[in-house]
Image (tube, rainbow, N blue to C red):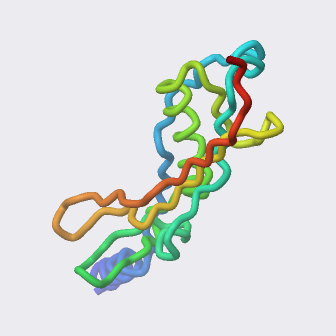
Amino acid sequence: MRYLISIFVLMLAACSSTPEKVYYQLPVKSPATQSAVVMGQQNQIWLQRIMLADVLTSNGITYQTSDVSYNNASSHLWASPLEQQLGQSMVSELSSALPGRLVSLQPLQNSPDTLDITLTSFNGRYDGKVLVQGFWTLVAWQRDHPS
């Protein structure tokens, strides 16, 4: 009898335990070295803003459960805000792709070109696909160029 009670207590404890939280971080390339000379000669691209759809702003990773339903995980969480991770990743990727430009999260010149990114989807789906959708706007400042 004591043995059965022990098993029952263990089973009950197993059912009531909280799932372990797992944290995720987007991978980031090691930053490209950019010198002050590059900043003086080329225009800066300032990643001014990354906006996320409301469903993506929670700490939990978003999963689309049907064509019209989304779920934000309670035990699979972003290690830091998704906007921050995407900003760091974009600066790293754009710096690698545009070695002649200074790309940063802060305005370092008087009239930098500004880049705004809006993500409408950044989630897994019930059918095994991953959605990454959005749009971007680049505003390039008019500069006088010597002839």
Q: Residue at x 43, y 67 (%)?
A: 120
Q: Is residue 46 left or right of residue 96?
A: right
Q: Nearer the viewer, residue 66 or 1?
A: 66
Q: Residue at x 43, y 68 (%)?
A: 19
Quarter residue 13 falls in? bottom left
Q: Residue at x 49, y 54 (%)?
A: 136
Q: Nearer the viewer, residue 22 or 145?
A: 145
Q: Nearer the viewer, residue 88 or 120?
A: 120
Q: Quadrant of the C terminus?
A: top right
Q: Residue at x 55, y 69 (%)?
A: 57
Q: Quadrant of the N terminus?
A: bottom left
Q: How many marks?
A: 0
Q: On screen, 30 above or below 78? A: above
Q: Residue furthest right?
A: 110
Q: Is residue 67 left or right of residue 30?
A: left
Q: Position of residue 6 (x, y in %)?
A: 35, 78
Quarter residue 101 falls in? top right
Q: Position of residue 96 (x, y in %)?
A: 50, 24
Quarter residue 132 falls in? bottom left
Q: Position of residue 44 (x, y in %)?
A: 69, 32
Q: Nearer the viewer, residue 129 or 19?
A: 129
Q: On screen, 112 above or below 14? A: above
Q: Position of residue 15 (x, y in %)?
A: 36, 79
Q: Is residue 113 left or right of residue 138?
A: right
Q: Residue furthest front?
A: 147
Q: On screen, 135 above or below 41? A: below
Q: Is residue 82 left or right of residue 141?
A: left
